Amino acid sequence: MPDSADEARDAAARRDVKQAIRVTADRLLVQPSKEVGERKSRAGILIPATANVSKRLGWAEVVQVGPTVRNIETGDQVLFAPDSGYEVEIHGDEYLILRERDVHAVASERAEGGTGLYL
């Protein structure tokens, strides 16, 4: 018959198990670049992330893609509107969950469909 010490040890082991995160459907898990937050103007003035900057897009690195995403792969850089998607914190790091349709452009090392422009 298990005693309370065994039950406590089993409960602690269950809490320590790390769970894998899977993105569903057409979702992307991205890590925004630092420029999406605070940035500097050309004159060197610090512009806070809370300032209203209309129609300014930001870049993020794709960490994981959902099973129905067709044109984006892990490791790509995507251009998106900062007000789209949902913020999430995982192990102290900030991420965004976006839909594939919220992405305006993709920068990758793959050669197909290139525009001749590079980051």
Image (spheres, helix red, strand yellow):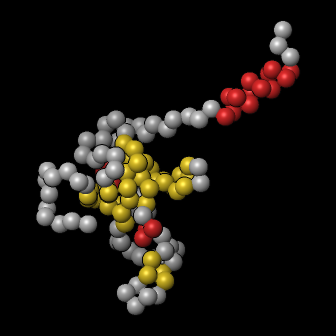
Q: Residue at x 86, y 21 (%)?
A: 4
Residue 109 image position (x, y, % from top left): 23, 54
Determine which quarter of the picture holds residue 23: top left
Residue 33 image position (x, y, % from top left): 42, 64
The one of 26 and 119 positioned closer to us in this rendering: 119
The one of 88 and 102 positioned closer to us in this rendering: 88
The one of 114 and 25 positioned closer to us in this rendering: 114
Q: Residue at x 32, y 61 (%)?
A: 79
The N terminus: image quadrant: top right
Can residue 54 be seen by looking at this rendering? yes
The one of 95 and 75 positioned closer to us in this rendering: 75
Q: Residue furthest top?
A: 1
Q: Residue furthest bottom?
A: 43
Residue 107 image position (x, y, % from top left): 26, 58
The C terminus: image quadrant: bottom left
Can residue 99 be seen by looking at this rendering? no
Image height of 18 relative to 40, above or below: above
Image height of 64 relative to 10, above or below: below
Query: How many numbered dots are placed on residues in this image?
Result: 0
Image height of 107 relative to 11, above or below: below
Q: Residue at x 59, y 54 (%)?
A: 92
Q: Is residue 81 left or right of residue 88?
A: left
Residue 35 image position (x, y, % from top left): 42, 70
Q: Residue at x 62, y 32 (%)?
A: 17
